[in-house]
Amino acid sequence: MVTRERPTLEAVARRAGVSRATVSRVVNGSTSVAASIREAVTRAVDELGYVPNQAARSLVTQRTESIALILPETANRVFSDDLFFPAIIRGVGVELEAADKQLVLMMAGSSKSHGRVERYAVAGHVDGVMFASMHGADPLPGNLARLGIPVVCSGRPIGGPDVPYVDVDHFGGVAAGIRHLVAGGRRRIATIAGPQDMVAGIDRLAGYRATLDEAGLTQHVQFGDFTRESGIAAMRRLLLDDPQLDAVFVASDMMAHGALLALKDAGRRVPADVAVIGFDDFEISRYSDPPLTTVRQPIADMGRTMARQVLGLINGVPGLPDAVVLPTELVVRESA
Amino acid sequence: MVTRERPTLEAVARRAGVSRATVSRVVNGSTSVAASIREAVTRAVDELGYVPNQAARSLVTQRTESIALILPETANRVFSDDLFFPAIIRGVGVELEAADKQLVLMMAGSSKSHGRVERYAVAGHVDGVMFASMHGADPLPGNLARLGIPVVCSGRPIGGPDVPYVDVDHFGGVAAGIRHLVAGGRRRIATIAGPQDMVAGIDRLAGYRATLDEAGLTQHVQFGDFTRESGIAAMRRLLLDDPQLDAVFVASDMMAHGALLALKDAGRRVPADVAVIGFDDFEISRYSDPPLTTVRQPIADMGRTMARQVLGLINGVPGLPDAVVLPTELVVRESA
DNA sequence: TTGTACGCGTTATCAT
DNA sequence: ATGATAACGCGTACAA
C-alpha cells in the first residue's frame, strides 16, 4: 500500500495554466475570478483529485475546524451501560455536523491523560473545547479559557464559574419529585445521592434536603456513584437504616434501577410498600419493572446547547449568556 | 478573551540563546545535545509555556497523531439506547490512549456527511481510519485504502474484503444458540433477523438457516433493524405467523428485549411457552425479565483489536493479518 | 481580475 | 554538538 502523492495547489495551478493564488481563490470560493478560468481550475481540481492540505491551511488561518469534547473519565467508565455520555455525544454531534466541524473525543480519566489533553488543546489542535461530567474543582477548563481557547462546560463548574456553562435545573426537578411523593402520602422519604464531587450529585442532594425540610420530614441519605451496582448497595443500606421507609428518591436512573432490584430482592412491593423516583429518564426506564417515575433532564439538548455556545464563542458572536439552565420535568409512571 | 500569543520555537531559541534547530532537538528528545544546553532549553520551554504547533509539525512530518472512527450512521441512531457503539468506542479509546493518539469521531449518516468524511480523511487530517457498522457495499473504505490511507473495518465488508477487517464468529455463535434450543426439545424455532444490508444481519441469519436445515426443522423468519421497537413488531408478526412456536432466536439483545415484551404482552411465558435467545450480551440483559440467554460477542475487544490493527498499519508492522475473527460464546441464563 | 512574494512554525539536511 | 537554511502547502497583502 504505497502512499500516492497527493496533488498540491501548485500542481493544479500548472495543469490549469494559472497561478497558485488563483487556484486558491477558486477553491475558497472567492468571487473575483473570471468564469472561464474558474471553470478550468475546477476541472483541473477534479481531474487531479485535489484536496487542500489541512495542516498547511491551519498554519496560516489559525483554525482547525475541529472541536474537542473532553470527558474527564476513563473510557471504561464513560461507556459502561450508562446512557448519559452517549446522549451528550449525540447532541454535540448533531450540532457540530450542522456547522461542518469535526468532533474530537478525548477521555481524560487518568492524570496522565489529563495532561495529554491539556497539551493537545493548548497545541492549537482544536478551535474550541467542551467539557462534560466534571469532578471536583478541575482547573483545566479555567486554564484553557485563560489561554484564550473557547471553552464551555456541561454542569456548573465547582469552585467558581470562571467559564460559561450549560446545566439543568437539578434543584427544581428534585423538588417536584419529592413533592409528588409527599402529595401521595409518603412520609419516610429516603434518598440515594450521587457522588459529592460532581455538581449533579451535590445539587440533587441539596434539592432533597431543602424540600424535606420544607415538609418537616426526617432525612435518610446514602451515597452511590451513579452506577446500578452502587444503587443496589445503597438501597440495602437504606433498608437497614430505616426498615419502615415508604419512598426513596434516587439521583440517577441507573441507581434507581439498582434500587428496584434491591427492593424486589428484599420482598418490598413498588410502589405499594415503597415508592421510587429516579433522575434522567433514559429510554430504558419505560421498561423497568415497574416502569420508573423519574425526573427527565434533556441530556442531548445539553449537548446541543453546549456545542452552539462554543461555536458562538469561536465565531465571536456577541451577547452570549455565561450560563444556560435547561428545565427538568417530572415524568410520572408506575413506580411512584 | 484575547488570544494570548503562543511562544514559538524561535522565541524559545532566543531565550535560551541557541538556534531553533537545537530547541527542536531537545523538544523531540534527540540525544545529541549537550546536557547544559538541554537544561537551559528545557527551562526556557517551561518559562515560556511553549507547546509545539501541531499544524506546522504535521506539515513537515506528514503525521497528525490522530485516528478517525467512522460510523456510517446518524448521531441519533448511533447513540440511541443501543450499547453497541459505546462499547466499540470504549475499546478503541482505551487502545488509542495507550498509543497516545487522538480519536476523531465521525458520524456519516447522511450522504452529505458521507462526502464530508471522505474529504476530511483524504485531506490528511488523520493518520488512519476505522469503520464500524457498515451498510451495504460502501465503497468508502476501499477508496481510502487505495489512496494509501491505513483502513480497518469492524465487520467483514460486503462485496469483497479489499480492506483488513475485524469481525466475530456470528455463524458459530448462532449455531451454538440454536443447538441449545434443539437440545432443550424445542422444535418450532423462529428467528428475528437483523437488517440484510449489514454483515451482522446476514451472517446471523445464515447461521440460523444452516443450523435449522441441519436439524431438519422448518424456518420462520421476520426482520428487524436491531432496535427494541422493531423487535416488538417482529415478535408480533411471528406469533401471527406461527402461534405454536416454542422458541425464537433473536439477532440482537435489543430486539430480544422487545421480543420479551411482546411475548409477555401476548400472555406467553418465557421460557415455559417460548424460549428466547439474544445476541450481544449487553450488561443490561442480565436484568431483563427473565434474564436473557444470549450469545456474547466481545464488542469492546473488537474495538481494541481494530485500533491495534490500524496502529500496526500506520507503523508499517509486517505480517498483519487481513482478517481477525473473534470468538463468540453462548451465555445461558433463564430465558432459554 | 490575476500574479508575485512573503510568512505561518516545524523538521531535516546540510555544513561547520 | 550546533547552526544556517531549505522545504512542507497554503492564504493573502500588494502590485500589476
Image (spheres, coloured by chain):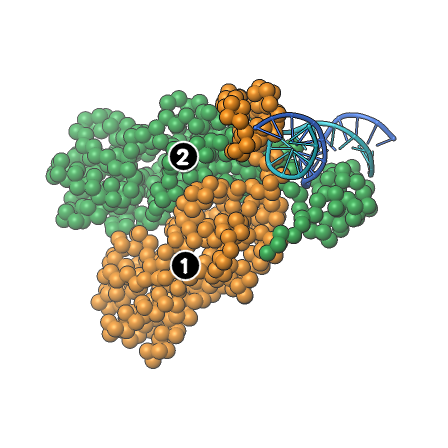
Chain colours: A green, B orange, C cyan, D blue
- For the point 51% across and 52% down, which residue is it? B317
x and y percentages locating residue A37 in the rendered image:
81, 45
User: Circle 1 is placed at which residue position?
Assistant: B226
Circle 1 chain: B
x and y percentages locating residue B133 in the rendered image:
47, 56
Regarding residue A242, the answer to whether it shows in the image is: yes
Label 2 SS: helix
Q: Relative to the observer, which residue lies in front, C4 or B121?
A: C4
User: At label 1, which amino acid type do we have?
Assistant: Phe
Which numbered disc, 1 or 2, marks the residue closer to the eye? 2
Q: Quadrant of the N terminus of chain B?
A: top right
- For the point 60% across and 45% down, which residue is it? B124
Circle 1 packing at 10 Å, graded few (<14), some (14-19), many (20+), is many
- For the point 78% across and 37% down, which residue is it? A32
x and y percentages locating residue B314 in the rendered image:
53, 49
User: At label 2, which amino acid type do we have?
Assistant: Lys
Regarding residue A282, the answer to whether it shows in the image is: no
x and y percentages locating residue B80 in the rendered image:
41, 49
User: Circle 2 is placed at which residue position?
Assistant: A112
Circle 2 packing at 10 Å, graded few (<14), some (14-19), many (20+), is few
Residue B264: which numbered mark, if any? none
Direction from residue A211 to residue B130 in the image, left or right: right
Quadrant of the image occupied by residue A171:
top left
Direction from residue A328 to residue A312 in the image, left or right: right
Quadrant of the image occupied by residue B60:
top right
> Are tags 1 and 2 found on a single chain?
no
Q: Relative to the observer, which residue lies in front, B41 or A154?
A: B41
Q: Relative to the observer, which residue lies in front, A1 or B266?
A: A1
Q: Quadrant of the C terminus of chain B?
A: bottom left
